[in-house]
Image (cartoon, rainbow, N blue to C red):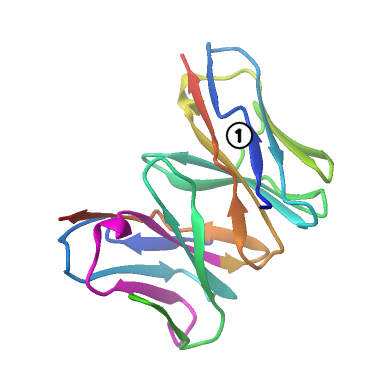
Amino acid sequence: GQQVMQIPQYQHVQEGEDFTTYCNSSTTLSNIQWYKQRPGGHPVFLIQLVKSGEVKKQKRLTFQFGEAKKNSSLHITATQTTDVGTYFCAGYNFNKFYFGSGTKLNVKP
Amino acid sequence: DARVTQTPRHKVTEMGQEVTMRCQPILGHNTVFWYRQTMMQGLELLAYFRNRAPLDDSGMPKDRFSAEMPDATLATLKIQPSEPRDSAVYFCASGFSPGELFFGEGSRLTVL
């Protein structure tokens, strides 16, 4: 069945360091979305990627969608303590969103 | 501010009791999802509605879970009987699929 794998599971960084989380699907996706969940909160939409090879930026965040539309990455440049939380990718296929297991980011000041 | 509303926010119950969680999706959204979140399983899809019709509930234990959408303003998730392993945070999300999903704040369920 459809699976979306996400690595790493945890990442601890010093404030100012970069961070990357990777998402891989077992099948080609129609689109992929990224969400951020703060501790104790609910997932909040960050961005959607639709096209093969697409790259989008939001300030310090860079999102990529692979050429085969089976993988994606989120890169944060110069992390800040406000970046703490769990980042989820969600691949869309067959009318459903398949969420990755998330990467929990901890940023030490 | 349009938002997805879930009730109750917290529920503590004893094993064997019936639990009903409710969700008011954002007005006009055509899709509603129920997800369960635990430490071990991440976000697990339980059920999915499009235009109020159930499209997929393959992720739901059918012997004890049921999901319905009696009207456009209400989605329900029922567990009967509840078990300790059902303890989790249950999220409802609505949207215009395949666009952005708007999540509610979740219902934290503890089954003793």
Q: Residue at x 53, y 76 (%)?
A: A28
Name the amino acid, label 1: Pro
Q: Residue furthest front?
A: B1
Q: Which residues are magenta?
A: A66-91
In magenta stretch: residue A88: yes
10 Å crowding of disc 1: few (<14), some (14-19), many (20+): few
Chain ID of residue with mark 1: B
Tag 1 residue? B61
Tell me if residue B99 comes above or below residue B69 in the rendering: below
Residue at x 66%, y 33% (from the top left corner): B62
Mark 1, secondary structure of its residue: loop
Query: Does residue A85 belong to the magenta stretch?
Result: yes
**Which of the pair A57/A87 is nearer the observer?**
A57
Residue B69 placement, left or right of A40 = right
Q: Quadrant of residue B38?
A: top left
Question: Can you tell which quarter of the image residue B61 is in?
Answer: top right
Residue A101 percent coordinates (x, y): 40, 53
Q: Position of residue B107 (x, y in %)?
A: 55, 32
Residue A87 visible to the viewer? yes
